[in-house]
Each structure stands twice: as C-alpha cells, then as structure tokens.
Image (spheres, grey):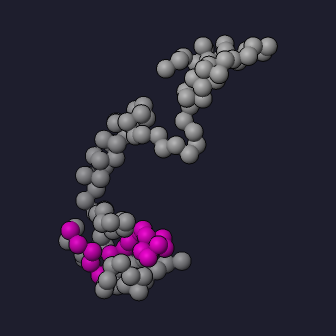
Amino acid sequence: MIDISTLKNWFKKGLKPTQEQFWEWMDSYWHKKEKIPIEKIEGIDPILQTINTLNERNHLIIKTRELQIFKVAPNSNNNILEIGDFVQGFVEEQFINATYNGGDSTKLTSYGIYN
C-alpha cells in the first residue's frame, strides 16, 4: 500500500500523475458501494468483545431472530417469549415496540403495538 504523503505528491499543483499512479490512488480508498470487511476495521475486536460481555451479563434481554425481548415480572423464563413480555424489533417487515399477547410470534396480530 502506498503511503498518503506519496499519493499527495503525485497530485501536487502542476503535476500530472501517470495512469498507474492514478489507479494506485483510486485503489487506496474504499468506494462507498464496497463493503469494508470487518477484519479491516482497526480496533473492532475490543469493541465486539465488550458487546459480547455486556450481552452475557444482561440476562434480562434475550435475542431471538430479529426481536429483543425484555422480560416483564412475573415472567422469568429467559429461554422463551412469554405473554406480557415487551419486545422491540421487526415482525412482518415492520419495526415494533409491543407487548407479546401470545400466538405466532412472527405475526403482528400476536402483539399489542405501541405507537
């Protein structure tokens, strides 16, 4: 990879970079339509570890598919969605804040949705 000061020198006023230099410059940056691989993000590992640690400590929040489930007393089974639990997330492609009323958890009709 070419360092940034070298790249800048190729484009100083009055200079004309070669085609190869131009390509080197273009290849030095991520295009907005390109996905940046997570392993290329400097410092991401400690951030991900912190998130994992927080998730492990917070036993009242359970991740299931695309919903966050917040246990509501007297519900205590952290392994299942129970009637009365508060949820946030996507159901039938709609983001909801709702109370689970029972039934098919993939259907909007199973929730009391808050506006």
Say left or right for 33 vs 68. right
Residue 30: image location, x then y, percent: 54, 36
Q: Name the residue furthest front.
A: 19
Q: Name the residue furthest right.
A: 14
User: Magenta includes 105?
Assistant: no
Comparing 92 with 37, the one in front is 37
Query: Please, is residue 87 above or below residue 63 in the view?
Result: below
Q: Quadrant of residue 31?
A: top right
Q: Judge whether residue 79 can be spotted in this image.
A: yes
Residue extent of the magenta highlight: 79-96
Residue 98: image location, x then y, percent: 43, 76
Which residue shows up at 25% across the image and 52% down it?
A: 56
Quarter of the image that includes the C terminus: bottom right
Residue 41: image location, x then y, percent: 43, 35
Which residue shows up at 54% across the image and 17% down it?
A: 3
Which residue shows up at 55% across the image and 27% down it?
A: 28
Residue 75: image location, x then y, percent: 24, 75
User: Magenta includes 90?
Assistant: yes
Which residue shows up at 69% across the image and 17% down it?
A: 17
Query: Please, is residue 5 above or below residue 99 in the view?
Result: above
Say left or right for 94 vs 48. right
Total labels: the figure holds 0
Q: Quadrant of residue 62?
A: bottom left
Q: Judge whether residue 97 can be spotted in this image.
A: no
Comparing 29 with 110, the one in front is 29
